[in-house]
């Protein structure tokens, strides 16, 4: 069963290679060069075991050809800290004292079905909690390669396969495996481009839909696109989210969260599951 707008007959994207198929040679080469550069930079870095912080690694997708890389990244990070749920992370950041040790709080943006299919079994196996931020209007839907949702909203340009989002039943099953469902708004539009009334709708209605369908209180929000001041107003939208009942607001700004970090401005480190552990070392040794 599909609920699509124009996915006439195209298979759902299962491989990272498929998701990349529309990318230009220039972009592919640039990414390879960048990967080599980051690996070189990582040579002199060390990840300390005690770093007094909570770090939020985040992914958008774990396709079937990324499962091995994903598991090896989690195994690697396990050497340096404990994986905790977002509620535990918030209570540690909220406590009135210096953080002892290093913690990782794993999050996934967009609610793609590949995260349910391929990431969740690994999380269950390793007993790692995580948060899936879902876009409530897209839950249970599939969009063909030519859909504006596929191309413009999520940037899968030129791919030949459809993108599929988790359904509510999958969200509920994920909760049973230790996942928290957070809001990634109703329609994944840039908050900075919306009128206040629309922003309230994006935050309030997504929270309502998640609570109705999961029977869990939705306490955690993640801003679409994620760049503070460009995609959303860090202070203003954080205050609004807090007024509407959210306890945390995740951004795409990199860096560790230390004692005193604003809960409505959480910093996270974006990862691709095909990156080497040297690249992880680079990002997680940043002060
Ligand atoms: Zn997103």
Image (tube, helix red, strand yellow):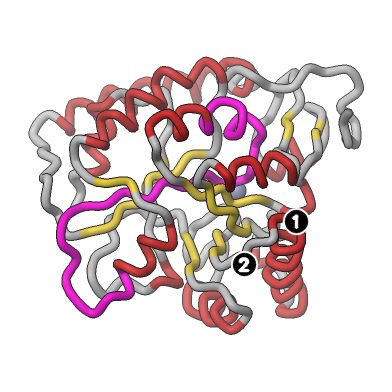
Residue 31 in view in this figure: no
Position of the N terminus, as image quadrant, is top right
Q: Is residue 114 magenta?
A: yes
Label 2, on which residue? Answer: 217
Q: At which x and y percent is residue 58?
A: 44, 44
The image position of residue 154, as x and y in percent, is 66, 41
Residue 239 showing in the rendered view:
yes
Label 2: how many Cα within 10 Å (few below 14, some 14–19, many 20+): some
Distance from Cα at disc 2 to Cα at disc 1: 10 Å
Q: Which residues are magenta?
A: 93-120
- At 48% across and 39% down in the image, what residue appears? 59
Q: Quadrant of the C terminus?
A: bottom left
Taking the spot 69% from the left edge, 54% from the top edge, the residue there is 188
Q: Nearer the viewer, residue 61 or 96?
A: 96
The answer to whether 248 appears left or right of 277 in the picture is right
Query: From what the image shows, is residue 185 above or below residue 44?
Result: below
Which of the 4 image quarters holds residue 70?
top left
Residue at figure coordinates x 18%, y 44% from the top left? 285
- Residue 185 appears in which quarter of the rendering? bottom right
């Amino acid at each position: 069963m599909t609920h699509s707008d124009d996915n006439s007959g195209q298979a759902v994207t299962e491989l990272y290679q498929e998701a990349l198929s529309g990318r230009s040679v220039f972009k592919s080469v640039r990414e390879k060069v960048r990967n080599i550069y980051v690996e070189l930079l990582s040579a002199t870095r060390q990840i300390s075991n005690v770093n007094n912080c909570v770090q939020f690694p985040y992914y958008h997708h774990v396709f079937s050809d990324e499962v091995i890389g994903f598991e090896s990244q989690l195994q690697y990070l396990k050497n340096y800290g404990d994986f905790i749920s977002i509620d535990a992370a918030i209570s540690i950041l909220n406590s009135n004292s210096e953080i002892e040790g290093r913690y990782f709080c794993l999050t996934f943006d967009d609610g793609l079905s590949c995260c349910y299919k391929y990431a969740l079994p690994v999380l269950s196996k390793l007993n790692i909690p995580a948060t899936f931020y879902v876009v409530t209007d897209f839950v249970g839907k599939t969009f063909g390669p030519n859909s504006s949702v596929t191309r413009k909203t999520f940037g899968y340009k030129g791919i030949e396969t459809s993108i599929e989002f988790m359904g509510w039943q999958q969200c509920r099953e994920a909760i049973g495996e230790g996942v928290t469902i957070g809001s990634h708004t109703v329609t994944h539009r840039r908050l900075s481009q919306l009128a206040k009334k629309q922003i309230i709708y994006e935050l309030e209605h997504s929270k309502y839909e998640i609570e109705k369908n999961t029977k869990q209180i939705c306490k955690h929000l993640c801003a679409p696109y994620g760049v503070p001041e460009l995609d959303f107003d860090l202070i203003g939208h954080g205050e609004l989210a807090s007024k509407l009942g959210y306890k945390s607001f995740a951004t795409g700004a990199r860096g560790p969260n230390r004692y005193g970090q604003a809960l409505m401005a959480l910093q996270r480190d974006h990862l691709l599951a095909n990156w080497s552990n040297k690249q992880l070392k680079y990002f997680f040794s940043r002060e």
